[in-house]
Amino acid sequence: MTGWRPTASLGRASALGALGLVLALAAGRPALAAFAVPLLLHAAWGITGKPLSGPRVQHHLDHRTLFEGQATTSRLELSAEGAEHVVRAMGQAAHVAVSPRSGAVQALLHGGRPRPAHDLDTGLPLHLGLRHWGLATLGEEKVAFTSEWCGFRWGPASLGHASLTVLPSRLPGSVLAPAPHPVGLVGAHRSRRIGSGVEMSGIRPFTVGDKLRRIHWRHSLRTGELHTIVSDAEEDAAVLLVVDATADHGCSGGVGDTESTLDVSVRAAAQIAEHHLRIGDRVGLRVVGGGGAVIPLSTGTRHSYRILGALARTRPAPVGRGELSRLVLRAPPGTVVLALTPLLDPHVADVAAFAARSGHDVVVVDTMPVRAEPVLDDPLEPPMADLVWRLRRLDRGP
């Protein structure tokens, strides 16, 4: 609701003042006039203080992208000539902590802007703590103004729902197990793909198409047959992260709280990607279900944020058998494939088996939380649902 409208206070002051003055004149009671005149003066000052134009309000966030567990501030840019008081309120949203907890702040205005007291000159700030990765939508914001002497009110007007991207936490952990086949070029691990490099990795019999300059003459003279030098490609090791987003089981409570299966998968993928990118390896991402994000192999800080952004946009969604049959990992030979899955969907196991048959080193990471609960499509009695879930956990292994 926009436009300056009379407040209930102005209506009461006008009505009671006029009634008191009429009764004072009719009954000849000066005491009633003494009661009515201040109310009429209040109403007159409120009417004369009506602003001539509406306020201009814009809101913005200090950060549009941040990591879960971090905080940002939402501020107002306002210009309201003739207004004396402003109130700003924000609704509640999941996994968003607002300070103050009521989600409302107010200030007296001076010249259409907040008075420089209690940090109000910085734009009526609301401090927001983001506790869960993903595309966060904040609660609806509303703002209202009142003119001098509380004569007229503008609003409350909705400012809409602001949104921002919350990246999964990428704090590097203590990784003790090395990647298969270490010794790299720029990074710590070398690619095992055969290519035209300078480091010799072996000798094999000469075949049609081999370059003559790569013939190993000493070994050829000793064996009586032509042999050629085999070298590794001049590139670092490749790590492909396959994230199972076909379903999300368990309760997601944010940072430091309970985790669902997708929470564990996404945060583990972010941590593994950060670790390998720090040591110079090439990292790619393939999300099974949940939008099917595909990030090709690359390295560097910019690539790290590409992977984290794709993980933040991941949502649980089932995937059909036909879609899996057309799935292409787009990984060169020698790539280490890390499949992060709760091992509840056989389709993801098929993807891991396909990667192993393609000659990749496959590592399956179990992301099932200890206290995860199932997501049921059909309503079941609680005892029956608990029994089915226990059988399913036994079926997936210890």
Image (cartoon, rainbow, N blue to C red):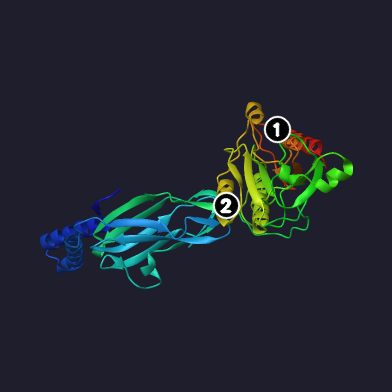
- From the top left corner, tell me how far across and down residue 33 is, in percent: 16, 66
Q: Residues within 10 Å of mark 1 (few under 14, many from 20)?
A: some
Q: Secondary structure under badge 1?
A: helix
- From the top left corner, tell me how far across and down residue 212 is, in percent: 72, 42
Q: Is 18 in front, or is 23?
A: 18
Q: Which amino acid does label 2 sit on?
A: His
Q: Is residue 282 above or below residue 316?
A: below
User: Which mark is on residue 181?
Assistant: none
Q: Secondary structure under badge 2?
A: helix
Q: Is 386 in front, or is 362?
A: 362
Residue lying at 40% horizontally and 71% vertically, measured from the top left: 119
Q: Residues within 10 Å of mark 2 (few under 14, many from 20)?
A: some
Disc nearer the start of the sequence (1/2): 2
Q: Is residue 136 visible?
A: yes
Q: How far apart are marks 1 and 2 (CA)?
A: 28 Å
Q: Which amino acid does label 1 sit on?
A: His
- From the top left corner, tell me how far across and down residue 377 is, in percent: 64, 32
Q: Quadrant of residue 110?
A: bottom left
Residue identifier under label 1: 347
Residue identifier under label 2: 303
Closer to us: mark 1 or mark 2? 2
